[in-house]
Image (cartoon, rainbow, N blue to C red):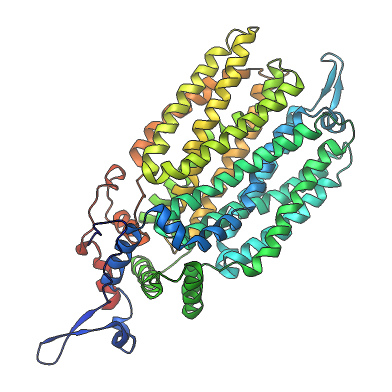
């Protein structure tokens, strides 16, 4: 495959060509225009187009890609907005545990503790039920998205989300079951939001921006967490029911904004091509750039990549996600989220404010520290926009997993002296450091890797399965952690760091063995390397050759 010599110099366009032999054995070269009129054998598998498209995409720097595809960048950020609600919901569950009026209206008064306490079973229910809804939402994305398109799936999310938020807002005191139902319904939409955003970004973004836009899903999640903590800090000391109703009600803003903007958002060109709507796909490709890109080459690349994947496997069912090479890809897509949860993210982010209070901090300090934890996470995520392309996905994911392990062990050791105020502040500091490390690598890169390792044909299904696993692991953690942290249960406090530090050690080893480097690889290149069973640690150095595309010959024969 030819590589451009200078990132600022556009590679010379190579017109797609095919050779054919006449009756006397002589070869003739046909151009793209004649191919359109040729019989089906010439319809797919244009290796020159795939090679030229890959060289063109790899020639762009991130800055150049933003200039050319700024419209695509803006729309990707817009479609990721639903992920904000995922972060908001995950944080508001744990954050409201520190709100006295919430514990009063949904808990009981403990004479021994001298305060209102929310039972551990209801803590687990409130924090895990959204994950249960997210599991079904993520799994349903494949069907809904393939039927209605990426925009249609987001519209369904918005309607379901508004209904779920409505139920939560109008829940009366001690109607705990009603609040659980509202969070379950809203959780369904949250699973679809995150899955749909990841699929959309990976299909609309050019190669140079794919890591940035897919990792922005996590940025929106962190912004949701920050917004949740900020709202709870502002309302947490209110004595009325609006101390928790207002945090619920503010979620309405974002589904409404999405519904207003959806009619103007471009559909995924990959989905349109699969539906046979190539003219519409071409119009979308024209719309997504500034007019300087080779739209015909991009369209040909999409068609040829789809043909390449069709030649590997004709079907595109959920069962195919677990067969052969796609089974390996699905395993990686799921494991990045298992490793996120194993790194203790639910404990650090979901229970940070509550943990600070249990450690002896005043309510005001606990709220501020909770906001600080998520605020520093936003900074880490923004820095990731540079590191994701500079150092790569595999490197950053594995190193931040290792660094998280070190910090978690330090938190565990600091928790051993129970009444040392300096140790408590040190634990709070390491909690903030942990979140910076997590949001620099583990958090955003999970959404990058699981979207990139899936094949284009199975992407919406594989991504949905990944979110299902993410929700399942989150649900388990949300059930277990209250029993580990709550004073009337295990009361481990910061010693939980030993548990998650050990899991991080296992995750670091697994990541080294199985996570591939997907930076600067087009969809067809990744398809080929997975089919060739290239070792994950060799993905970054593997050289693509024409013989790596033998399946394309099948598509023409």
Pick the quarter of the image with the N terminus: bottom left
- Residue 515 in view: no
Name the residue at 65% across, 39% down. 225
Q: Determine which quarter of the picture holds residue 365.
A: top right
Residue closer to the observer: 25 or 312: 25
Q: Residue 63 in the image: x percent, y percent?
A: 42, 53
Name the residue at 87% across, 15% down. 111
Name the residue at 44% across, 54% down. 209
Q: Determine which quarter of the picture holds residue 144.
A: bottom right
Pick the quarter of the image with the C terminus: bottom left
For residue 113, side relative to residue 369 (left or right) = right
Q: Residue 224 in the image: x percent, y percent?
A: 65, 43
- Residue 257 in view: yes
Q: Residue 216 in the image: x percent, y percent?
A: 53, 48
For residue 291, side relative to residue 49 (left or right) = right
Q: Residue 410 in the image: x percent, y percent?
A: 50, 17
């Amino acid at each position: 495959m030819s590589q451009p010599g200078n990132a600022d110099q556009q590679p010379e366009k190579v017109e797609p060509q095919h050779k054919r032999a006449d009756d006397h054995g002589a070869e003739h070269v046909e151009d793209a225009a004649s191919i359109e009129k040729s019989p089906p054998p010439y319809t797919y598998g244009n290796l020159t187009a795939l090679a030229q498209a890959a060289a063109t995409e790899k020639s762009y720097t991130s800055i150049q890609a933003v200039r050319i595809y700024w419209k695509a960048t803006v729309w990707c950020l817009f479609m990721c907005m639903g992920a904000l609600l995922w972060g908001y919901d995950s944080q508001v569950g744990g954050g409201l545990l520190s709100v006295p009026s919430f514990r009063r209206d949904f808990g009981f008064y403990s004479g021994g503790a001298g305060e209102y306490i929310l039972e551990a079973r209801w803590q687990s229910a409130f924090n895990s039920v959204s994950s249960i809804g997210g599991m079904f939402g993520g799994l349903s994305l494949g069907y809904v998205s393939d039927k209605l398109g990426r925009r249609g799936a987001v519209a369904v999310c918005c309607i379901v989300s508004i209904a779920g938020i409505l139920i939560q807002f109008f829940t009366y005191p001690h109607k705990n079951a009603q609040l659980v139902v509202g969070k379950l319904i809203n959780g369904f939409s949250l699973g679809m939001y995150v899955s749909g955003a990841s699929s959309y970004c990976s299909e609309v973004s050019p190669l140079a921006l794919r890591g940035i836009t897919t990792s922005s899903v996590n940025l929106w999640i962190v912004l949701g967490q920050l917004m949740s903590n900020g709202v709870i800090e502002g309302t947490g000391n209110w004595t009325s029911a609006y101390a928790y109703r207002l945090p619920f009600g503010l979620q309405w803003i974002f589904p409404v904004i999405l519904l207003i903007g959806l009619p103007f958002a471009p559909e995924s060109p990959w989905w349109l091509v699969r539906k046979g709507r190539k003219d519409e796909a071409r119009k979308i490709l024209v719309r997504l750039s500034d007019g300087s890109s080779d739209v015909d080459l991009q369209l040909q690349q999409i068609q040829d990549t789809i043909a390449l994947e069709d030649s590997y496997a004709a079907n595109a069912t959920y069962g195919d996600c677990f067969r052969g090479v796609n089974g390996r890809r699905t395993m990686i897509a799921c494991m990045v989220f298992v490793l996120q949860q194993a790194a203790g993210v639910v404990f650090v982010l979901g229970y940070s404010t509550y943990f600070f209070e249990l450690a002896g901090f005043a309510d005001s300090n606990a709220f501020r520290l909770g906001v600080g934890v998520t605020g520093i996470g936003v900074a880490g995520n923004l820095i990731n926009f540079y590191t994701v392309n500079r150092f790569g996905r595999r490197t950053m994911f594995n190193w931040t997993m290792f660094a998280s392990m070190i910090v978690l062990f330090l938190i565990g050791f600091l928790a051993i002296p129970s009444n040392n105020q300096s140790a408590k502040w040190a634990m709070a500091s390491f909690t903030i450091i942990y979140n910076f490390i997590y949001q620099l690598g583990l958090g955003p890169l999970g959404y990058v890797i699981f979207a990139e390792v899936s094949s284009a044909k199975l992407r919406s299904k594989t991504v949905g399965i990944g979110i299902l696993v993410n929700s399942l692991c989150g649900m388990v953690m949300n059930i277990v952690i209250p029993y580990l942290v709550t004073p009337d249960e295990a009361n481990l406090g910061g010693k939980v760091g030993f548990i998650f530090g050990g899991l991080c050690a296992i995750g670091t080893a697994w990541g080294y063995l199985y996570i591939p480097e997907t930076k600067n690889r087009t969809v067809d290149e990744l398809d080929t390397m997975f089919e060739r069973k290239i070792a994950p640690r060799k993905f970054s150095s593997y050289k693509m050759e024409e013989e790596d595309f033998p399946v394309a010959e099948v598509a023409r024969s």
